Amino acid sequence: MSDTTSGPRCAVLVGPYTCGKTTLFEDLLFAAGAIDRRGVVKEGSTVGDSAPEARARAMSTEMSVASFDYLGEPWAVIDCPGSVELTQEARAAMMVADIVVVVSEPLPDRAVTLSPILRFLDDRDIPHLLYINKMDLPEASVRATFEALQAVSGRPLVLREIPIRNEAGQITGMVDLVSERAWRWTPHKPSDLVSLPERLRDAETQARGQMLEALADFDDALMTELLDDVVPSTDEIYRNLTNDLQLDLIVPVFFGSAENENGIRRLLKALRHEAPGVAATARRLGVAAGPGAAGGTVAQVFKTLYAGQSGKMSIARIWSGEVREGMVLGRDRVGSLATLIGRRASPRGAAVAGEVVVLGRMANAATGDLLAETGTTAPDWPAPPAPLYALAIRAERQADEVKLAAALARLAEEDPSLHAAHRVETGEMVLSGQGEVQLQIVLARLKSDYGLAVVQARPTVAFRETITRPAAQHSRHKKQSGGHGEFADVHLEIWPQPRGAGFSFEDRISGGAVPRQYIPAVEKGVQAALARGPLGFPVVDVAVALTDGSFHSVDSSDMAFQKAAAKAMAEALPGCGPVLLEPILRVTISAPSEFTPRVQRIVTGRRGQLLGFDAKPGWPGWDEVMALMPEAETVDLIVDLRSQSLGVGTFATAFDSLQEISGKEAERILAERRATLAG
């Protein structure tokens, strides 16, 4: 084994929901002898879907790690959830991978679903290969899928195999383009070496030539050989393939059927011989690596989880040195050390560079942290995506509110794409994330892991109101009782301001009609009244002037003038033509170009104003649609958007303005507000 591939290595499986990653994960473990029995996703018996939420939904909901030896070499393979709502989980695993296996379905029209994954890998220079799965499907097409995938890849794809088909057109095997050997597949059995079918010789020669031409783009010596009609040796081809893959210059493409266990050992062979090692990956991340690295022991946390009575657990990749149970790493002492196969932990006394381990009771370690014997640093790490979907939640029992806040903090530590915050404006606890499924998984875990029943609702939009007409108002506050009374008299002028101007207050008192010390109290009373206008919402874009008034040398006070000013505003505002305002967001929607018309219909169907669309920079085949949309219409926008874009559409927002809303929509909002205030 060369220096570039020495030490324990790590491969990560990613791909869209339903592409078959978890079945492939199970196949790899079974073929490597890491498990005795091959589980089945539908039965809930796989290593990769051991979480209760995963089994309930028949989908991966969190990454699953398996460490094992294959032909005497240590490996860790990580299966990542395919849901686009759990992207942050997959990104964290890809960051620490030596190689990423991108799993695709053999359907050209679904190739676009890989765009976000491939773009992330390209941007981070992470070596990766493609595995086209489900080749047992009658409609499976290697060439059409290959071409569709090339259209969304930033790196040249290099086809490593061509299919063998029977008379019925079904794929029954493959021809390796490097060794020029043919293999026949049998479901759930090792492949058989067979003679290369004569009918495929021309196709094999052509495909092999295309593979060599792709490699020659990065090797002048190979280009010269091809121009001179010199056939390169098999060893030379393998060297080029390995070098170009490790440098992230090319993306090799393999295929098979995870359901039938076909193409699994060929994939394992490619990983074993061509994947880079821990030293190359650490260099990519800017970390010193290897058993004797000058920086001593360094490990990086890429997943945090809480495991019942075991407490906080940190899954980490060791970049250099040796991690031992009880040693100080970062700001904590390693409470326990183990490797994983799914949820089964195998305790270890020590682990070396390259291994993926779970560290127990690392209270101060956060996902992304580099832990060293000298302390903790936070390197370049993918920032969590902005929230796209939200729910207002509260504990069914008021006594559980503190417990709920603590549980949400833990869940957000496990998944940094979750956000939980208390909105002062509405008084709601708002849980936000990447989509409906993600948040429903969180609610299920609150129930199962923390015993918390939660009431959920649509988050309240922060509506506002303003006025359309000026008014003048005189108000007097007078209260007489034993001892000092209360007295204040104010004359106010009120008028609307341009949208976005905010609140302003003027003091026009002359001659001491209201003493200077009471002027701030008048302004405070005015602002208190603006906190809830006649429509039930905060009032904005209003100017108020104190023009006259009177006081009593004994009975006047700050509180009296506050009350007088608030009373004047409450009496004046209903006659100022109050109107309802809603927040308008500037929305940029990203989706494959073929879905742009659908996106435009979604926008207009949600009271949006289209501003235009353009090609998305750096994303071939994608558009950006710009629009103005009411915030209320974006709360569940992502649900519609994904349903109309093969699950990959997304959007970003920024506040634009407040705009008047009228008609039936305003009536509905005001009726809901009255009911809320009455309750």
Image (tube, rainbow, N blue to C red):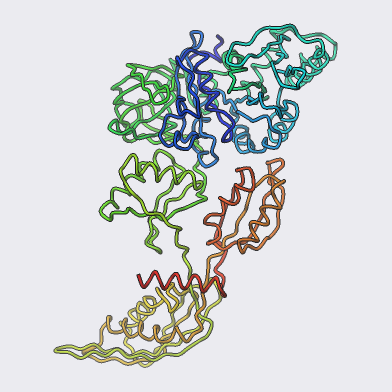
Q: Residue furthest front?
A: 168
Q: Where residue 215 appears, x then y in whole percent?
A: 73, 19
- Is 552 located above or below residue 369 in the figure? below
The residue positioned 47% from the left and 87% from the top of the image is: 575
Is the N terminus in the top left, top right, bottom left or bottom right quadrant?
Answer: top right
The residue positioned 76% from the left and 14% from the top of the image is: 222
- Is 589 located above or below residue 184 in the figure? below
Residue toward you, 55 or 239:
55
Give the number of marks.
Answer: 0
Quarter-wise, where is residue 441 in the image? top left
Looking at the image, residue 590 sits to the left or right of residue 655; the answer is: right
Quarter-wise, where is residue 178 in the image? top right
**Visible residue check, residue 667:** yes
Q: Where residue 646 appears, x then y in whole percent?
A: 63, 42
**Visible residue check, residue 130:** no
- Is 577 located above or below residue 276 in the figure? below
Q: Where residue 54 appears, x then y in whole percent?
A: 45, 34
Is the C terminus in the top left, top right, bottom left or bottom right quadrant?
Answer: bottom left
Looking at the image, residue 363 sits to the left or right of residue 414; the answer is: left
Residue toward you, 485 or 292:
485
